[in-house]
Image: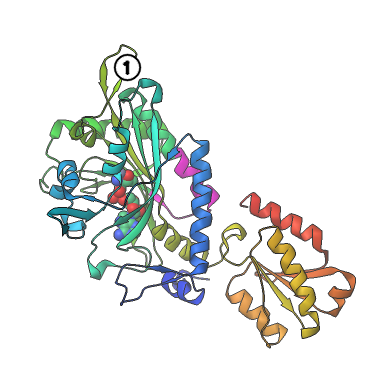
Amino acid sequence: MDDNDLKDHREIGQAQELFFIDPEIGLGLPMWLPNGATIRRELERYMTDLELKEGYKHVITPHIAKLDLYKKSGHWEHYRDGMFAPMNRDNEEYVLRPMNCPHHIHLFNHRPRSYRELPLRIAEFGTLYRWENSGELSGLIRVRNMTLNDAHIFCSPSQLKDEFKSAVKLIEKVYKDLKLKNFWYRLSLHDPKDKEKYVNNPKMWEESERAIREALDELELDYKEGVGDAAFYGPKLDVQIPNALGKDETVSTVQIDFYLPEKFNLNYLGEDGKKHPIVIVHRGIISTLERMVGFMIEQYQGAFPTWLSPVQVKIIPITDRNLEYAKKLLEQFKDSKIRAEIDERGETMQAKIRDAQNMKIPYMVIIGDKEQESGMISVRKRDGESLNNLDFKKFLDELNSEIDKRA
Ligand code: TSB
Ligand code: ZN
């Protein structure tokens, strides 16, 4: 297939019933259908398991906060255009959060912290709201309501480089597991001329940009530089991926921040009993589930690996006589937590196979009189390969192991 035949994620998302955008709900506010919600849930499980292994602590915080919080953090000064307008009730102003950092910072700061707790890696699939221009909204890739695979790593300056490097290595692992391709790294720097977008503190920028460059040198990573692409509070390493139309967007990001720790007076008690300053690494590995699923749909062209496929097995009875038997197999798939469905429509077997193939369902299990009598099954894979006379139990075991390994 040449690149011009690549389908955009919106087209595949509609054909496979993954999500839709409803103007009566609002632009940029995706509605996740059961198939899309399944992919999201599996991705979230995968990432949460990895984070637990890497020593992250998961938290849950509200999607809104008082406007004053964002005045203190600098978001209101530097990021206001990207925020929904404040809501006023009982003479207090609240906003939908555009980022999770202030909540996680308050969580860190709710009691004194000892050097023994560092680095403290606070993680959340945090839901955000951003006011993106309507002309820039695009399916799942640029939305106004999104859930970010976020974490803020609170550490001492001497731990900073290692934490940054571990986050980049986690990106490399995840991209390998998810078989993502065509990505490149961008070192996103501030633009000293843009006084509105960036915190005005040349010494801080010099230090944080030096720290990120040193860490990148140690990683021996190839990257391009983007002046004016930094966050308002610090430089970032961004992972860029082109969409089906060839436009690059940022997916993963790892950021170094000396600014918010100072604003919120973050410190820890050292071994010497004295207070020492904290630095923050902000990182999103999976990016927002919206953007990541959007890119995955495009890169896989809808053919998700089995562990992520909304429907993993389609059971196709050849005649009505085979329906009872098909239902028995369905129960066994369900007992193993495999997502299976029976195609009970009165269509021909060929039509059912074609439809399952179009939906990119990894396995089709075809049940006729012969299979029913012998207790063996015939399987077709979505790429057309056929496997006849398989022992059902053996097929189930192999499928389970493929899913468990997230192969
Ligand atoms: C990583 N404070 C950090 C966080 O701790 C942060 O919010 N960084 S961010 O602003 O760069 O956003 C993180 C990621 O969210 C981006 O790298 C991008 O992949 C994704 N993202 C940003 N805007 C949108 C959007 N409108 N729609 C979908 N995903 C988005
Ligand atoms: Zn953050």
* Magenta highlight on residue 235: no
Q: Quadrant of residue 80?
A: bottom left
What range of the chain is rendered magenta? Answer: 169-184
**Secondary structure under badge 1?**
loop
Q: Is residue 77 visible?
A: yes
Mark 1 neighbour density, 10 Å: few (under 14) some (14–19) many (20 or more):
some
Q: Which amino acid type is marked by label 1?
A: Gly
Q: Quadrant of residue 366?
A: bottom right
Residue located at (31% from left, 11% from top): 272
Residue at numbered disc 1: 270
Image height of 158 relative to 271, above or below:
below
> Where residue 23 appears, x then y in whole percent?
31, 77
- Residue 161 position, x and y percent, is 36, 29
Give the quadrant of residue 198.
Answer: top left
- x, y percentage for residue 281? 33, 36
Asked if the magenta segment contains residue 172, the reply would be yes
**Most foreground residue, 134 or 147:** 147
Q: Position of residue 152 (x, y in %)?
A: 35, 39
Task: Give the farthest residue toward the top.
Answer: 272
